[in-house]
Amino acid sequence: MLEFGASMFFTDYSMSPSALGRALEERGFESVWAPEHSHIPASRRSPWPGGAELPKRYYDTMDPFVTLTAAAAATTTLKIGTGVCLVNQRDPIQTAKLVASIDHVSAGRFLFGIGIGWNADEMENHGTVFATRAKLVRERIEAMKEIWTKSKPEYHGEFVNFDPIMAWPKPVTKPHPPVIVGGAFPHGARRALRYGQGWIPIAGRAPIEEALRAFHQMAAEAGRDLAEVPVSTFGANEDLEEIRRYRDLGVSRMVITLDSEKEDKILPVLDRWAKIIKQAKQ
């Protein structure tokens, strides 16, 4: 069944994550997603993939694990997801504990959306080399999976290296929360098939229908069952025909992007979407 989520850059001037979570759950949404940027360097050397001008919300967004915990505490069934967590800028041992902890707090409702990042100057401030960030992310995810699933995990790679450790809690979700890999076709799709449990392409930035058909072929060649790597498209439009077309192409979840606004601006948008969701599921 096609599910619907909503993404917001939570800021000190946006709707709160707890209020948005309740509003989404009441209107039939399946999930809420929070993006991540630790900071935006004043240099602004890296072009934003979404256009010429970087929106203010990118500078102001709160930590996703904090906001999603607030959303989880205010809801009972709504799934909470990072959309996406910049793993290249986070320590894998500490992040493994964060993920396991929020999975416990939410009673197994956490979705671990991840990405390799586009802002070279931002990640350089974290000591990450832009050219090798994809391999760094893969190793960190592999290391985290070891931590989540083993009593004395260890990992030895080019960028991540540690001898046996003991780290708890282990996630509620077994073997661990789904790692849903963000990124454009074909590289993001390949990463999702290699170590993910889902793929997140952004609608509108590429010929998504062609990419989805090619993804199905890539999954078959990689020996992955499509049910193991469901597709979640971000940037859904209020277009019922388009939504049904994506559903027929095998998309499992469509995520709308909400502005960082208060209830008076957001609730009318959600009310329109509640009607679309009912129609799309008929």
Image (cartoon, helix red, strand yellow):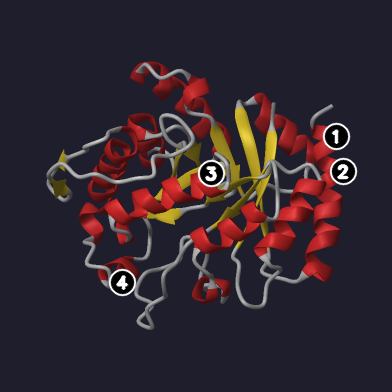
Residue at the location (36% across, 40% down)? 187
| Residue situated in front as seen by the camera: 85 or 55 | 85
Residue beneath disc 3: 110
Q: Residue 275 carries which label?
A: 2
For disc 4, the neighbor class at 10 Å (few under 14, some 14 to 19, many from 20) is some
Distance between mark 1 and mark 2 Cα atoms: 6 Å
Distance between mark 3 and mark 4 Cα atoms: 29 Å
Is residue 26 in view from this perspective?
A: yes
Distance between mark 2 and mark 4 Cα atoms: 42 Å
Tag 1: amino acid: Gln
Q: Is 151 located above or below residue 62 in the figure?
A: above
Q: Do the residues labelled 1 and 2 touch (CB within 8 Å)?
A: yes
Q: Are marks 2 and 4 in contact (CB under 8 Å)?
A: no
Secondary structure under badge 4? helix
Residue beneath disc 1: 279
Residue beneath disc 4: 121
| Residue situated in front as seen by the camera: 104 or 192 | 104
Secondary structure under badge 2? helix
